[in-house]
Amino acid sequence: MKWYSNPAARDFETTEDVRELAAFHASLPQYAPTPLTECALLAEELGVAKVYVKDESARMGMPSFKILGASWAVFRVLSARLAAQQPDVQQPTTLAQLKERLAAGTQARLVAATDGNHGRAVAHMANLLGLPAAIFVPSGVSGAAVTAIESENATVTRIEGPYDEAVAAAKEAGAQPHSLLIQDTAWPGYTEVPGWIVEGYSSLYGEIDAQLADAGTVPDVVVTPVGVGSLILASVVHSRSRGAAHPSLLSVEPETAACVLASLHSGQLMTVPTVVSSMNGLNCGTPSTVAWPILLAGIDAAVAVSEEQTARAVRDLERLGFDSGPCGAASLAGIRVALASPESRARMGVTAASTIVLVSTESRAANPLPTATPPGDE
């Protein structure tokens, strides 16, 4: 099934404290809130009052939002190592302080598996800190994405298999001496780092709330592309915290890799087979075990979209002036599917007065749309 809804999701509550996180992100080079742009033509098409696009195509010099989570997780992991080595020394609170401490001789190599953007973000952090990085990529990742990761002075290893096999290879490499695994999916025994990555992503949703407040409105629907579920977990934790607007949260996945949608329908964590998709960053077969219980409780609706629907959304957003790759444009494709029937509109609480936010997670440079769409992560 391509559609799921949970009427009880807006009653779910979480807690969130991002004060330390906000101060750290503010210390990063080039940090600034990314644009939130109103698009009247999309609002007219969807029959709502306002549609905003949160444009993550140029986040701190990176072509996606991933640097928010990777930077925070790298900071927390390395700070924990320093604290274990020198417990009586004051711990860093900024990137500059961390780099200064590492220069004293701490040995570390950062390791990650990626469909493109997460790996580049981890490699970028390693490069900023003067550390080596080893990145593992599955089949189907574009040469341009690999080149971008290598431009950060990282070593890239191609795995002839799907994303889950790349994760297994990274896990093995991360167990080697002086290696630190910075992975955005979780499994039993590996939950702390994915949790920090999700915390990092929450800055994106805090920016949305602040930007909408400046525009005199609040979100009624927030649409997020989904791979293993880390980004939408940040959306749920932020949006369901006390005092937040509690908008309807819609997750969007490729039809060929809809692991969260399948899990929501079954009520338990599911693994699904995947094939090559233009939505590389969403092409994941198993949800994060950290994310799953909270997604089950806090997601209002979920949809799956086709390659053709996403390709159309990429082209439409480009005509409207947005630089959005297939993963980012999945938000537009997904809301079109979700609002196609009066029943689904009603279940999401969408009216002519609603404000919808589409999270566009990446630029086209991060994940180019193929000239010939293959048959048919985030």
Image: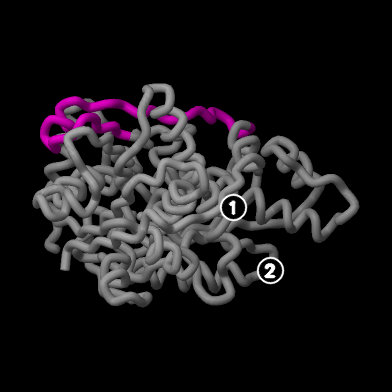
Q: Are marks 1 and 2 in contact (CB under 8 Å)?
A: no
Give neighbour class at mark 2: few <14, some 14-19, many 20+ (Cα, 10 Å): few
Q: Say whether disc 1 or disc 2 marks the residue closer to the N-terminus.
A: 1
Describe residue 374's horizontal placement relative to residue 356 as left or right: left
Q: Is residue 369 magenta?
A: no
Q: Is residue 29 magenta?
A: yes
Where does the image place residue 291, in percent across and percent down from the top left? 45, 63
Q: CA distance from mark 1 to mark 2?
A: 19 Å
Magenta residue span: 27-53
Where does the image place residue 149, in percent across and percent down from the top left? 45, 48
Q: The disc labelled 2 sits on which kind of residue?
A: Pro
Name the residue located 59 percent from the left edge and 67 percent from the top edge: 174
Where does the image place residue 91, in percent across and percent down from the top left? 79, 46
Q: How is the image coloured?
A: one colour
Q: Quadrant of residue 51?
A: top left
Image mark for residue 73: 1
- Circle nearer the viewer, 1 or 2: 1
Name the residue located 13 percent from the left edge and 30 percent from the top edge: 44
Describe residue 153's horizontal placement relative to residue 144 as left or right: right
Image mark for residue 177: 2
Q: The disc labelled 1 sits on which kind of residue?
A: Ala
